[in-house]
Image: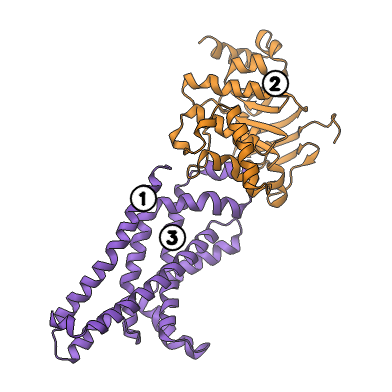
Chain colours: A orange, B purple
Amino acid sequence: MSDATPMVRMAGVNKHFGALHVLRDIDLEVARGEVVVVLGPSGSGKSTLCRAINRLEPVDEGSIEIDGRPLPAEGRDLAALRSDVGMVFQQFNLFSHLTIMDNVTLAPIRVRGVSRSDAESEARVLLDRVGIGEQSGKYPAQLSGGQQQRVAIARALAMAPKVMLFDEPTSALDPEMVGEVVEVMADLARDDMTMVVVTHEMGFARRTAHRVVFMDDGEIVEDTTPESFFSRPATDRARDFLSKILTH
Amino acid sequence: MSVLLDNLDDFLSRFGVTLGLFVLSGVASMILGTLLAAMRVSPVPAMRTVGTGYVTLLRNTPLTLVLFFFALGFTKLFFYLPFFLLAVVGLSLYTAAFVCETVRGGISTVPAGQSEAARALGLGFTQTLSLIVLPQAIRSVVPPLTSVQIALLKNTTVAAGFSVVEAGGFYRVVNEQGGSTLVALLWVALGFVILVVPLTAVQRRLEKRWSVAR
């Protein structure tokens, strides 16, 4: 695919949960190396949007493409496509019965067929990069939330993904641990990783994002630069949202 | 004491058969029960139907009837097998239904985020189930699974009614010799207690070892 092909492309995407219309005519393109932060009040559909990109949430209509390839239906092809899309969850979701090392090497070994020794040396590099190098023999429950989330990022990176999805990666963390995770994410952005980040971290959105997408009630209401979103929001809904979070 | 000592060889060989029935049926029921549990959570409706049907049929049938079928019907309908193997098959099929339901209960305790994370990494349904969900599910149901296996150990005595020479039939030997049936039964009970104690010890060890990961 040429560099002009967007890494993620959503067109006319709609989704309902029963009577609730959670995604309304979503059109979104994310270019290669671009960092897009998705903001919005809770219940605005931003998590659902993020999860729709690798089909953890199937959508009712519309098309979604990753690197020019439409998302396949459930099955082997979808699994292959997901292996190229890293995902980091609010609740970390590290495999609780496996050591940190096994968490990071499982998918490279089982999905990519990498040898255990290669997977482990790659894992050590990644764990060092996120500052967990010393803890690789421990179990997830023995680490703090911030450490677990950094391992979760390393686990996703071990698959050498084309794009990383972050679904509220700092929302379940104690405040003093937010910084260490945001730092790892900023580091990834500097290395030109394509990222879609659903977050409440306004600092990250201001400093690191190339674009801010503001959602409300299942719709994309604004899609602009962080600078213009935070200083000159174009809609009342965005102004209302910003006044609520920035007064604290 | 003489009831035991006079018949020690018979007593021990009968418990040997009991142990054989238990170990073979235990392993087979764990494997089959886990496969059935996997079928019951499968995305394929036909697999779920087969799993549900199996459990409904076997769990609701008295063990005696299941063994009757294998002792009397199987050889007539299909081919000859020794009673010992027929008993193993019957006990395994019966116990697998209970293992299945216990493991399925364990699967429901594994947070949805675990399988979402696995699928997001590109693991397929079978890999997600076998590498992530089942290992955690089985860890969480060690005590009830042990109970199912202890019940199996005691259920082996039902096979005595079908010409399998195992511990439950020991009292009849003693009775024929004019010895005390009651004393014979007490010795058999003690034998079963001795067999169950190590199972309980294994349960405690597994619980302790796996508690770290939670």
For disc 1, the marked residue is: B207
Regarding mark 2 in the picture, which secondary structure is present there? helix
In three-dimensional space, the C-alpha distance between marks 1 and 3, rounded to whole angstroms, equals: 20 Å
Sequence-wise, the earlier of marks 1 and 3 is 3
Regarding mark 3 in the picture, which secondary structure is present there? helix
- Residue sitting at x 52%, y 21%: A178
Chain ID for label 2?
A
Residue B82 in the figure: left or right of residue B182:
right
Relative vertical location of residue B53 with respect to residue A103 in this rendering, above or below: below
Regarding mark 1 in the picture, which secondary structure is present there? helix
User: Along the line of sight, which residue is nearer the eye, B117 or B176?
Assistant: B176
For disc 3, the marked residue is: B101
Q: Are marks 1 and 2 on the same chain?
A: no
The quadrant holding residue A131 is: top right
User: Along the line of sight, which residue is nearer the eye, A187 or B32?
Assistant: A187
- Residue sitting at x 53%, y 41%: B113
Amino acid beneath label 2: Arg
Relative vertical location of residue A215 with respect to residue B171 in this rendering, above or below: above
Chain ID for label 1?
B
In three-dimensional space, the C-alpha distance between marks 1 and 2, rounded to whole angstroms, equals: 45 Å
Relative vertical location of residue A70 with respect to residue B147 in this rendering, above or below: above
Q: Is residue A122 visible?
A: yes
User: Along the line of sight, which residue is nearer the eye, A56 or A125?
Assistant: A125
